[in-house]
Image (cartoon, rainbow, N blue to C red):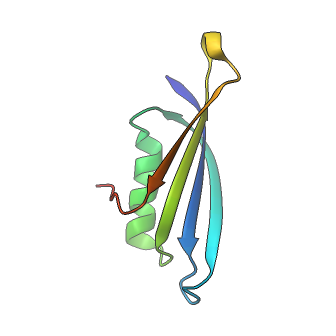
């Protein structure tokens, strides 16, 4: 089921590899496959110079558990294809 999904991407600045930055993005996505998030991370990996360090995903539940939040942490050594 589609639900509001928040994605936090921690990445190293391209010119200052010792500085870790954060990018936050919200979209409607489907768990646990997260097709929009995967497309976004694939684009980032191939078109943006800042290498990703970590990704945190949080998704609000709808229905009987409305208001509860599921979250996932991914070390970005897992590559998306």
- Residue, far top: 64
Residue ranking furthest to the bottom: 15
Q: Farthest residue toward the left?
A: 81
Q: Quadrant of the C terminus?
A: bottom left
Residue at the location (51% across, 55% down)? 55
Percent coordinates x, y for residue 24 in the rendering: 65, 55
Residue 18: quarter of image = bottom right
Q: Position of residue 25 (x, y in %)?
A: 63, 52
Query: Within the image, what quadrant is residue 10 found in?
Result: bottom right
Q: Is residue 27 above or below residue 30?
A: below
Q: Quadrant of residue 3?
A: top right
Task: Please report the residue visible at 56 percent of the width from the left and 90 percent of the height from the top.
Answer: 15
Position in image of residue 68 (x %, y %): 66, 25
Give the number of marks: 0
Which residue lies at the image location 52% right of the left edge and 27% below the top edge?
2
Name the spot of residue 53 as percent of width and height, x first: 49, 67
Farthest-out residue, right: 67
Residue sitting nearer the eye, 12 or 47: 12
- Horizontally, is 43 left or right of 69 in the view? left
Figure check: 36 above or below 31: below
Residue 77 against residue 18 in the figure, above or below: above
Residue at image position (43%, 71%) is 47
């Amino acid at each position: 089921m589609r639900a509001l999904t928040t994605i936090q991407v921690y990445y190293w600045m391209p010119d200052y590899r010792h500085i870790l930055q954060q990018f936050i993005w919200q979209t409607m996505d489907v768990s646990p496959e997260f097709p929009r998030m995967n497309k976004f991370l694939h684009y980032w990996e191939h078109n943006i110079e800042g290498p990703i360090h970590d990704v945190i995903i949080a998704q609000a539940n709808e229905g009987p558990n409305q208001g509860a939040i599921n979250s996932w942490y991914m070390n970005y050594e897992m590559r998306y294809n």
